[in-house]
Amino acid sequence: MLKITKDLSKSRPKVTVVGAGFVGAGAAQRIVEKELADVVLVDVVEGLPQGKALDMMESAPIEGFDTCIIGANDYEQTANSDVIVITAGLARKPGMSRDDLLAKNAEIVGGVVDQVAKRSPKSIIIVVSNPLDIMTHLAWKRSGFDAKRVIGMAGVLDSARYATFIAIELGVSVKDVRAMVLGGHGDSMVPVPDYSTVNGIPITQLLPAEKIAEINKRTQDGGIEIVNYLKTGSAFYAPSSSAVAMVEAILTDSGRVLPCCAYVNNAYGIKNLFCGVPVRLNRQGVSEIVEIKLNAKDLSALQKSAEHVKELVAKVS
């Protein structure tokens, strides 16, 4: 009988992506195309991860990658993964906030964490499922992992949206834009103009305050803007890219500084909470919380955002 796909390499890193929907499949594709790791794509829908994995493998001769991806409906082949990316869960629909997803996705994510943590006890977990900050907290509690090995993908995506809108408004190359968004992944997120630059120039020197306020608002509404267009789904291209940026920083041990949902204890006046802050990522996960000096307005907004996250965490607890 012919093999459906190649065997996973024992010498390459292994990444498990849970959820073969648009975000999960997109992340898996980017990981193998970048040759960062072999991938196990897991989904409860029979045939879905297997079919998508085989389709991606058939693109390898064209795209020129030698990494391997396999699909599975159970977790046996995920054992000893280096990184687990959790995208499973319900997507938002028009009129639905991220917080509305809380109960159902808590059940889904909790079950996933139970399965992956016991098979890959040394792995790093990246949570993509919404509501992001609360699901990351849940993953930490259910896994029993050190907090530095449980991270949420939020700030990378929100900052990418911020950078996109800044580049559009100024008519500059997005390659020259560095943007920073902190706080919870929701309406209370905190775009930080002082640390958002075009080739090193703060946008506060390039745009009037009222225009920055408009861009900040569009960034906060970035997810629902796409949901309203799609009507039956939510964003997946930028979220999958954002998750893979974190995977790459971890597997390459780069020490790259990215805004992520991480466990904060005393930095920024926030205690014992997962919240969006700048962190340094390497092979151990979060090696450092980077505490930048915020002006009083942005610091207050970040702390207010953290309080909102804390309220939702209490509901899950």
Image (cartoon, rainbow, N blue to C red):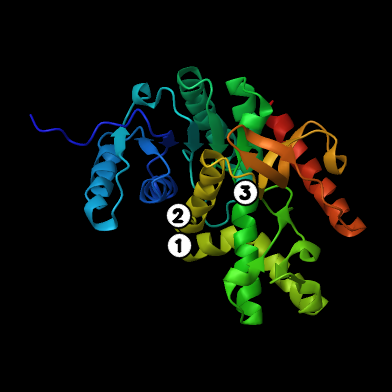
Residue appearing at x 52%, y 63% in the figure: 226
Q: Amino acid at mark 1?
A: Leu
The numbered mark, 3 or 1, whose residue comes first in the sequence reads 3
Q: Is residue 135 visible?
A: no
Seen at 67% across and 51% down, the residue is 186
Q: Is residue 172 above or below residue 312?
A: below
Residue holding disc 2 = 233
Residue 273 on image: x %, y %: 76, 34
- Give the structural element (helix, strand or loop) at label 1: helix
Q: Which mark is residue 154?
A: 3
Q: Secondary structure at mark 2?
A: loop
Q: Label 1 near label 2: C-beta < 8 Å?
A: yes
Task: Work out whether mark 3 precedes mark 2 in sequence or the reverse, and give the earlier one.
Answer: 3
Q: Quadrant of the C terminus?
A: top right
Q: Are marks 3 and 2 in contact (CB under 8 Å)?
A: no
Q: Position of residue 288 (x, y in %)?
A: 73, 38
